[in-house]
């Protein structure tokens, strides 16, 4: 198998692109895919300050690596979710990546933000699924750090497989409001929000893993223990089967959605602008934002538990 | 496991409906599903003459069985595709079903319509995929018989799995024009067309097979040999995995599409009415309809082959 670009010996074959590449040409190809996504979607410029949410996984670290290489002004944000050994290992990977390259990494540890703030505690106290509690925490801290520290853009490492799986879930239930908003660039709907972008939205999980491997990036390979059985994984498996039967399916599904599918949904009602949460001051559609409502529930539940254990204690 | 309806011993469990049924209650349940589809979509009335396209498979025979039971005025139409032993066995099944019940079955054998008219011959001469040639033949003869013999409605046995697989294919490529027209009732776009309906569109393949089995319907079990590797089968497999992970997925996918998804696409341009084909007189968007164009290609190719073999013959 020969490299499509230089005709040398190829190391990786990409059926979806009907191509094969040697290592140097693959790295160039991957970088160009990211550059092209940034340019074609007008994601950000070299003058803007970028905050990259890094989990210690291959996607966010590969994204950070490419952006540093391309000369962007980047800072990492690691949010410690408190999910046992998984979280401590992912923190180690993110911190080692930043330290080895002299990059700025901002760290927020939920467990240090207050009692009962780690994801397992929040999920337990509120009886919400862990992934739902986690999503609310991430959105809040990502938005808050980006706003408080004056960043222009918030970047996440969502890849093609993530986007295709999310699209599949939205389509299987025909969630028009979700379909209307699933884009690689989300403009801010309030002055306290920053633009949110996904520069890897057309790079598959496999392509990102190959890039991380070739670049010697040491990332956390294990999935979050809470993800087991999540419907996203079923959708990914489904899409991998469709991709195997017809290479290019995932990319066409997401690209054609953005080009011809989504305009049909986007025409529906413009959503009103959010006001500000009376708890934290961040944008919210209700009086309290989702994060503050969840925190109230955590505090109420923790207080009632404490009262119950006081009553149970001998006088 | 108890019957959800009568609390007797259940024979079949339907996870998508969170139900289980004994044999008599299942037959009632299935019939009611069909009745409800007919009523809710205003498919047809007892006063109309129904032409049912029957292939000898479980879906079309189960549909015919239910409709006879419900007292509709039905006639079967069997189109002999000329696909070897598969076609002769499917003809036998359809004919035996009709004969045993004293039902009218109209038979059209493509091989008797003219030279080179059977599906394998058409596909070979025109170099089209067999399924594409077959689809064009079916559409033409179904439409023509329905019109020429004064039927009000043309019915096909497409089931939920067929509709969900078709929807998946249309969604993966975001084919807006196909999405705009995928409905269980297609009103005629020309006076020579009749209404086309799919009364089993919410009955799964499994449910239809159980009905056919319980009713002792002898149907052709084998798939058409040309279907192997067809993308429809990949989509069906995919949807079966999603259904296993979350029962009810297929039904929700199709129902929610019709309720909330499709209106987004239907709003696009109204298609102009077809004119009449200069070849056969049936409605067509071009000067020649797809069937007549294909027939011209068959004749031209057959003529050039004959000329070539004349030249090759000794003088």
Image (cartoon, coloured by chain):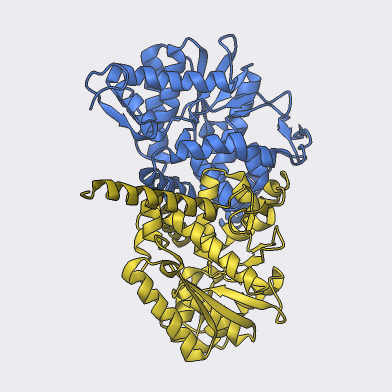
Chain colours: A blue, B yellow
Q: Quadrant of the C terminus of chain A?
A: bottom right
Residue A97 spot, x, y in % from top left: 38, 20
Q: Between residues B274 and A221, which one lies in front from this camera angle?
A: B274
Question: Which residue sits at x=44%, y=73%?
Answer: B57
Question: Which residue sits at x=58%, y=21%?
Answer: A43
Q: Between residues A237 and A146, which one lies in front from this camera angle?
A: A237
Vertically, is B152 above or below B170? below
Left or right of A245 in this view: B16? right
Vertically, is A246 above or below A104? below
Residue B225 spot, x, y in % from top left: 34, 62
Q: Does residue B9 appear in this view?
A: no
Left or right of A172 in this view: A232? left
Question: Which residue sits at x=68%, y=71%?
Answer: B43
Vertically, is A198 above or below B26? above
Q: Between residues B104 and A161, which one lies in front from this camera angle?
A: B104
Count every numbered label the image shows and give the total: 0
Q: Between residues A221 and B199, which one lies in front from this camera angle?
A: B199
Question: Which residue sits at x=58%, y=55%?
Answer: B279
Left or right of A293 in this view: A85? left
Residue A33 spot, x, y in % from top left: 45, 22
Q: Quadrant of the N terminus of chain A?
A: top left
Residue A120 spot, x, y in % from top left: 50, 45
Q: Does residue A286 appear in this view?
A: yes
């Amino acid at each position: 198998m020969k490299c499509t670009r230089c005709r040398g010996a190829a190391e990786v074959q990409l059926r979806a692109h009907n191509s094969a590449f040697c290592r140097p040409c693959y790295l160039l190809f991957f970088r160009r895919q990211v550059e092209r996504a940034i340019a074609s979607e007008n994601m950000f410029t070299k003058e803007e300050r970028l905050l990259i949410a890094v989990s210690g996984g291959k996607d966010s670290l590969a994204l950070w690596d490419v952006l540093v290489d391309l000369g962007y002004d980047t800072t990492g944000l690691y949010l410690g979710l408190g999910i046992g050994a998984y979280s401590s290992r992912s923190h180690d990977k993110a911190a080692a990546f930043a330290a080895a390259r002299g990059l700025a990494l901002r760290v927020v540890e939920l467990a240090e933000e207050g009692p009962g703030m780690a994801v397992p505690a929040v999920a337990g106290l509120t009886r919400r699924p862990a992934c739902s509690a986690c999503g609310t925490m991430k959105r809040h801290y990502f938005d808050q750090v980006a706003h408080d520290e004056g960043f222009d853009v918030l970047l996440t490492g969502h890849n093609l497989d993530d986007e295709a799986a999310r699209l599949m879930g939205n389509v299987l239930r025909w969630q028009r409001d979700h379909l209307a908003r699933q884009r690689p660039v989300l403009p801010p709907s309030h002055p306290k929000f920053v633009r949110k972008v996904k520069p890897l939205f057309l790079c598959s999980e496999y392509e990102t893993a190959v890039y991380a491997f070739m670049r010697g990036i040491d990332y956390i390979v294990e999935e979050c223990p809470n993800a087991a059985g999540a419907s996203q994984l079923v959708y990914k498996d489904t899409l991998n089967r469709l991709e195997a039967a017809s290479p290019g399916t995932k990319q066409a599904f997401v690209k054609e959605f953005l080009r011809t599918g989504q305009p049909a949904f986007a025409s529906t009602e413009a959503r009103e602008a959010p006001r500000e949460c009376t708890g934290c001051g961040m944008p919210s559609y209700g009086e309290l934002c989702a994060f503050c409502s969840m925190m109230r529930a955590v505090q109420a539940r923790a207080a009632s538990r404490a009262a119950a254990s006081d009553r149970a204690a001998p006088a």
